[in-house]
Image (cartoon, helix red, strand yellow):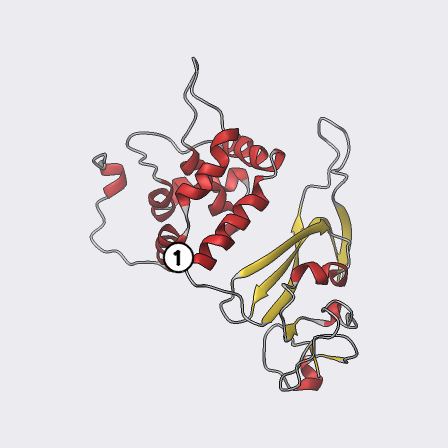
């Protein structure tokens, strides 16, 4: 173990454990880092005659910071210089080495995308949680969020990304993609993720967000009227359900206090 330099230790007399530091400490403990790195290793550049590549785990931790805190490539580089908690999580000591620059971060992200490793990483985390006894319950919260992307055509291809599209939310127009999430109602763990162009209707991917054992589903008005997504014949008498032959009600009419608004069938 390397001895920390003064750049990592600091001279502050007073300190407080922030929510960010608490969160990162928890992620340090629960994320199966060795297993995730093993998935990436076969695709990662090997040391050669040139400058040796930055370690896989360090780059993976930076990638996770981007997802958790919604940071772009240049933003995560600046955040690492600015936040000691983030540097400690990634393992960067500014007294010995600089933060990986945004180009290096971008290349690592593209490596994951080109080899479709995002889904494999997600599945590995889900399997790890299951082995720890964290299983999905019979309720799922469904929702979607727009992920903005540059709409400019000032790039090498002189065109927008064909997988992205524009959409309007209220009076505001957005360009990019949409992330659809299925979240366990009890543990709040994400058990399903689907990516579509931003203009795709939320309801079109509802079936892909359910694990098939739900007796109750929560969502907003975008999911109204989707009654054929549950397996036929599944009928829960003692509990509201979301299935064939049922009526979908919003929270305002059903009296459900869940957030986001509850869409149940009963």
The structure residue drawn at horizontal position 32% and vertical position 34%, both measured from the top left corner, is 94
Q: Position of residue 236 (x, y in %)?
A: 66, 81
- At label 1, counting other C-alpha atoms closer than 10 Å, the crowd grade (few under 14, some 14-19, many 20 or more) is few
Q: Is residue 179 left or right of residue 60?
A: right
Q: Looking at the rendering, in which quadrant would you find the C terminus?
A: bottom right
Q: Is residue 126 visible?
A: yes
Most foreground residue, 5 or 244: 244
Q: Which residue was labeled with disc 1?
A: 23
Q: Position of residue 233 (x, y in %)?
A: 74, 75
Q: Please, which residue is most extreme toward the top here?
A: 49
The structure residue drawn at horizontal position 51% and vertical position 71%, both measured from the top left corner, is 186
- Numbered disc total: 1
The structure residue drawn at horizontal position 62% and vertical position 59%, both measured from the top left corner, is 181
Q: Looking at the rendering, in which quadrant would you find the N terminus?
A: top left
Q: Is residue 77 visible?
A: no
Q: Position of residue 132 (x, y in %)?
A: 41, 59
Most foreground residue, 172 or 242: 242
Position above or below: 266 against 184: below
Q: Circle 1 sits in a helix, a strand or a loop, which is it?
A: helix
Q: Is residue 10 left or right of residue 257?
A: left
Most foreground residue, 66 or 154: 66
């Amino acid at each position: 173990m390397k001895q920390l330099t003064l750049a990592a230790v600091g001279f502050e007399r007073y300190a407080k454990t922030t929510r960010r530091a608490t969160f990162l400490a928890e992620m340090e403990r629960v994320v199966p880092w060795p297993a995730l790195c093993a998935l990436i290793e076969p695709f990662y550049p090997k040391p050669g005659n040139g400058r040796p590549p930055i370690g896989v785990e360090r780059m993976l931790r930076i990638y996770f910071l981007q997802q958790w805190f919604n940071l772009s490539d240049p933003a995560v580089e600046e955040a690492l210089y600015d936040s000691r908690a983030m540097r400690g999580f990634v393992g960067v000591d500014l007294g010995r080495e600089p933060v990986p620059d945004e180009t290096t971060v971008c290349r690592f992200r593209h490596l994951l995308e080109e080899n479709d490793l995002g889904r494999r990483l997600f599945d590995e985390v889900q399997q790890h949680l299951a082995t720890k006894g964290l299983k999905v319950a019979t309720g799922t919260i469904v929702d979607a969020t727009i992920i903005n992307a540059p709409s400019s055509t000032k790039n090498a291809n002189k065109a927008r990304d064909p997988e992205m599209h524009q959409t309007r939310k209220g009076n505001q127009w957005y360009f990019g993609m949409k992330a659809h999430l299925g979240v366990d109602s009890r543990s709040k763990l994400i058990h399903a993720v689907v990516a579509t162009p931003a203009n795709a209707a939320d309801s079109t991917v509802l079936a892909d967000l359910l694990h098939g054992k739900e007796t109750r589903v929560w969502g907003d008005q975008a999911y109204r009227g989707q009654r054929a997504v549950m397996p036929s014949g599944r009928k829960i008498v003692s509990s509201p359900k979301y299935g064939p032959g049922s009526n979908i009600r919003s929270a305002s009419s059903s009296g459900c206090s869940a957030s986001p608004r509850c869409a149940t069938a009963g």
